[in-house]
Image (tube, rainbow, N blue to C red):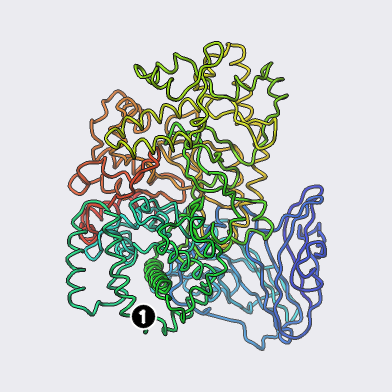
């Protein structure tokens, strides 16, 4: 059997096309052995043919664009052709090049194929070629994910077998291989040119609801018998523009339902999905849901410090969905606690978790025998054992020894190799570990049930991947070589925090991760794809460079980007004219600074914490030379004298400011240095001479905005693709803050959506972002969980609000209302809905602000996180039960009308 490749493509000098695949003649996936295609001037096609055995089989292949010595693989999964050598003598592949970085590519992700456009039942084609056809056969093959589940794809054309352009007599294609639609057909007049187009078919009404635009497609005359011509058409040509959707964001812990236990639970997601359906929203976005139980205190409420990147948080378990408690007294106590905890207007983390664990343990003992014999659990344990077994061991040992810091455990328990032995069912203390198997099994079951419910309703569930891992986690315990445990990750100063953020997570050892082709990342992404069809990658800038802070720092100012290209002292000397380590790299402390910071206590501070050197220069004493030393000293002071805690914190913060008064931070290599971030805001910088300030500012701008652009671009192109293509999830990156110029381009090339927050524009030249200018592959939102809500922000700065009211909302010369009234909220939401961005996602608090009766009375109680406060208690909870929100019919219709009016699905 002959297989002919044919691909239309206009190349430029130095370019040629290859095809690589599973057959020996195609190189068996070795690119250097790929089959070279030949260009036919007459047709404008690249072509070649190979021989295949006459038996039936399948080949897999893909096209490559060779540009000089650089290979560019076409976008998408491998192409597959199943053939029957006994039926056809010739197969002609009429393919099209699949370009990367096309917006339509993202419609093939799980968000669309598994949820938004999910096919409920596979439909066969309305017509097919006879198995014994002697004449040529055409196979229509269209990649078209964007088809409403109610509809199908059809084809009509000039040949009578295609209805002779009669819209009531179309060929309906099969979706058995969705998102590819197929049908085989023997044309009535194969020896003539056939014109055709694709359409969207409503099987209920038996009519075309949309016909694609553009010129007619053509089938060239074919006279060879026993020939199969495969028309691998790409893209339905929509005339209605890009698909755009809207969604709602709320953490799972913030959900409120009548059946909850003081906190949102996985089954509550079904209620939020029902509300999304009622309001025309197509997406539900949540914060990280992994287990953060490290201390059994409210500190564990921080969702970005998971003790496992795989395990789910026990707070989200619905107890009744596991089993009914058989003891009447236990049931009565549970009902009483539900009433008590649900009556609180916030998530009271510690009492909630105490209640959860109490009843989880009771249910475990009650259901233990049945659970351990359950085939579903046995399959779950076997499938997930790579993370589940060490997690169960870690969690039990954490509770046994009273700390998640495995370095403090008895030495014989510090090795993770003992996890399998510890968790054997015949061990006398197995219940310590079995409890965690039980909890994770039911959490997984409940979350999968909620996600499947959402998919069935056509709603995407969007998850959140934290950029870092917790220092005292299963991941650090089992694979410490993947992380730099002596360093800290964070973020440089931004609108959230003027001193930067120190997350205290270890940074990644990317070199070690690359050695096994980023296996850990692929496993992590694969596990998230178990639950989500779309994913937000927190601080995606970390894949280009992370803000790395030395272990001795508490704040983020003394960090530097890693990897980076630090400056040698000779380069600094050349650029600014001199180099003095003491003046540039040690804290610049003078008496007037002490009086400015400490006022009347300056003398006392000097005597306790500073030494005087020559010429009015002061130096911190040896025991408070670093911020971590200062932190330790003041923790002891607060512990000894808690009544003066606020005063001690004030002193501590101002001593931190003294340590930050440097202009350069030493790099790992001797004699290499990083300019301190925002050095122009320091007293040390202000007190340099004008000439040095000017030259230092030039060096600073070059270092942070030009020197690293290509270097960081290469970093992103190495690290991101293995993560991006590990799953078929639709990926959005949180790219706020100090963004390298190369980041948007790399994300666009990889088909990753960026984030556009109106109050935090990516363009430093503008004060507010304009949703109307957002690119299609992006998410627009009025805010995030790290910000105040619209109503809270409106009241923070009246001058800023007035400028926004005039410049963004167009109310020139008018006074902005004192409060963010519902009509103002509506205008802002309409702005976002009208954006060309693929998604407009709104915090639920901002949507509720549309209604003066439904919204919370005090907007200051609606903010989820305060990034400037590292000790923030994550306790926000929706003030309305979701059951009540579902019954607000008029309000829900208002949102639905807004969404539809702006053309979002």
Rendered view: 66 above or below 834: below
From the viewer's perspective, is 358 left or right of 738?
A: left
Indicate the quadrant where residue 642 lies: top left
Tell me the quadrant of the picture where the N terminus can be found: bottom right
Where is residue 678 shown, x and y percent of the image?
A: 52, 27
- Residue at screen point 69% across, 16% down: 577
Give 118 or 680, whichever is nearer the viewer.
680
Q: Which residue sits furthest bottom?
A: 132
Where is residue 740 shown, x and y percent of the image?
A: 58, 37
Give 885 or 338, whichever is nearer the viewer.
338
- Residue at screen point 69% across, 71% down: 192
Rendered view: 144 above or below 750: below
Q: Secondary structure at mark 1?
A: helix
From the viewer's perspective, is 472 left or right of 485?
A: left
- Which residue in the protein does label 1 denote? 368
Label 1: few (<14), some or many (≥20) within 10 Å?
some
Rendered view: 836 above or below 667: below
Task: Confirm whether residue 98 shows in the render.
Answer: yes
Where is residue 70 shown, x and y percent of the image?
A: 77, 51
Where is residue 833 shown, x and y percent of the image?
A: 38, 46
């Amino acid at each position: 059997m002959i297989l002919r490749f044919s691909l239309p493509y206009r190349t430029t000098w130095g370019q040629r096309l290859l095809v690589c695949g599973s057959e020996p003649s195609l190189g068996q996936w070795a690119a250097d052995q790929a089959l070279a295609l030949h260009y036919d001037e007459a047709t404008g096609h690249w072509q070649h043919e190979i021989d295949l055995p006459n038996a039936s089989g399948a080949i897999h292949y893909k096209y490559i664009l060779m540009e000089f010595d650089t290979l560019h693989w076409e976008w998408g999964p491998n192409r597959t052709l199943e053939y029957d050598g006994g039926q056809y003598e010739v197969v002609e592949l009429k393919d099209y090049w699949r370009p990367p970085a096309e917006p339509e590519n993202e419609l093939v992700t799980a968000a669309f194929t598994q949820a938004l456009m999910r096919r409920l039942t596979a439909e066969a084609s309305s017509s097919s070629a006879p198995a014994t056809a002697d004449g040529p056969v055409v196979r229509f093959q269209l990649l078209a994910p964007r088809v409403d589940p109610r509809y199908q794809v059809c084809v009509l054309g000039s040949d009578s077998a295609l209805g002779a352009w009669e819209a009531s007599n179309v060929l309906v294609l099969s979706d058995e291989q969705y998102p590819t639609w197929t049908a085989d057909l023997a044309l009535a007049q194969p020896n003539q040119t056939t014109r055709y187009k694709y359409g969207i078919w409503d099987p209920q009404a038996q009519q075309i609801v949309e016909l694609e635009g553009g010129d007619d497609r053509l089938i060239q005359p074919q006279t060879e018998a026993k020939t199969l011509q495969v028309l691998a058409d790409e893209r339905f040509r929509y005339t209605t523009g890009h698909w755009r959707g809207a969604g709602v964001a709320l953490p799972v812990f913030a959900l409120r339902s009548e059946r909850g236990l003081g906190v949102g639970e996985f089954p509550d997601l079904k209620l939020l999905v029902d509300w999304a359906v009622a309001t025309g929203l197509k997406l539900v976005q949540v914060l990280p849901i992994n287990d953060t139980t490290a201390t059994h205190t409210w500190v564990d409420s921080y969702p970005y410090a998971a003790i496992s990147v795989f395990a789910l948080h026990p707070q989200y378990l619905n107890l009744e969905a596991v089993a009914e408690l058989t003891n009447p007294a236990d049931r009565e106590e549970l009902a009483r606690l539900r009433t008590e905890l649900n009556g609180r207007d916030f998530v009271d983390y510690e009492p909630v978790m105490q209640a959860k664990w109490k009843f989880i343990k009771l249910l475990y003992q009650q259901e233990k025998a049945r659970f351990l014999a359950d085939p579903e659990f046995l399959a779950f344990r076997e499938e997930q054992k790579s993370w589940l077994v060490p997690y169960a061991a870690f969690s039990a040992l954490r509770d046994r020894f009273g700390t998640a810091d495995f370095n403090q455990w008895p030495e014989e328990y510090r090795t993770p190799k003992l996890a399998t032995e510890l968790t054997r069912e015949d061990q006398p203390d197995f219940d310590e570990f079995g409890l965690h198997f039980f909890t994770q099994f039911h959490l997984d079951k409940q979350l999968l049930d909620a996600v499947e419910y959402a998919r069935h309703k056509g709603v995407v569930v969007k998850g959140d991947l934290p950029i870092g891992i917790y220092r005292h986690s299963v991941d650090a315990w089992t694979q410490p070589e993947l992380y730099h445990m002596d360093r800290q990750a964070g973020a440089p100063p931004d609108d959230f925090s003027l001193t930067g953020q120190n997350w205290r997570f270890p940074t990644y050892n990317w070199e070690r991760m690359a050695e096994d082709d980023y296996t850990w990342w692929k496993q992590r992404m694969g596990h998230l794809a178990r639950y989500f069809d779309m994913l937000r990658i927190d601080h995606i800038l970390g894949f280009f460079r992370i803000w790395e802070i030395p272990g001795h720092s508490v704040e983020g100012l003394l960090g530097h980007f890693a990897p980076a290209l630090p400056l040698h002292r000779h380069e600094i000397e050349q650029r600014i004219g001199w180099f003095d380590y003491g003046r540039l790299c040690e804290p610049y402390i003078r008496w007037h600074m002490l009086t400015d910071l400490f006022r009347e206590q300056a003398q006392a501070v000097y005597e306790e914490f500073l030494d005087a050197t020559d010429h009015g220069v002061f130096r911190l004493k040896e025991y408070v030379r670093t911020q971590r030393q200062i932190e330790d000293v003041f923790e002891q002071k607060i512990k000894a004298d808690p009544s003066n805690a606020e005063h001690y914190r004030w002193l501590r913060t101002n001593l931190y400011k003294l340590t930050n008064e440097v202009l350069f931070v030493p790099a790992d290599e001797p004699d290499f240095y990083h300019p301190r971030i925002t050095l122009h805001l320091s007293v040390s910088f202000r007190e340099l001479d004008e000439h040095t300030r000017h030259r230092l500012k030039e060096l600073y701008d070059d270092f942070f905005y030009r020197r690293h652009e290509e270097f960081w671009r290469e970093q992103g192109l190495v690290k991101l693709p293995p993560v991006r293509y590990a799953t078929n999830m639709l990926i959005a990156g949180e790219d706020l803050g100090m963004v390298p110029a190369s980041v948007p381009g790399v994300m666009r090339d990889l088909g990753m959506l960026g984030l556009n927050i109106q109050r935090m524009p990516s363009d430093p030249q503008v004060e507010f972002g304009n949703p109307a200018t957002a690119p299609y592959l992006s998410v627009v939102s009025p805010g995030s969980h790290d910000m105040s809500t619209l109503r809270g922000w409106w009241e923070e700065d009246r001058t800023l609000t007035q400028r926004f009211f005039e410049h963004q909302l167009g109310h020139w010369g008018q006074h902005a209302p004192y409060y963010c009234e519902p009509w103002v909220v509506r205008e802002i939401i309409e702005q976002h809905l009208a954006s060309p961005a693929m998604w407009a996602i709104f915090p639920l608090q901002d949507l509720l602000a549309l209604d003066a009766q439904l919204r919370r009375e005090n907007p200051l109680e609606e903010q989820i996180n305060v990034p400037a406060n590292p000790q923030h208690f994550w306790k926000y909870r929706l003030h309305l039960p979701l059951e009540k929100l579902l019954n607000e019919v008029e309000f829900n219709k208002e949102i639905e009308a807004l969404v539809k009016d702006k053309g979002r699905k």
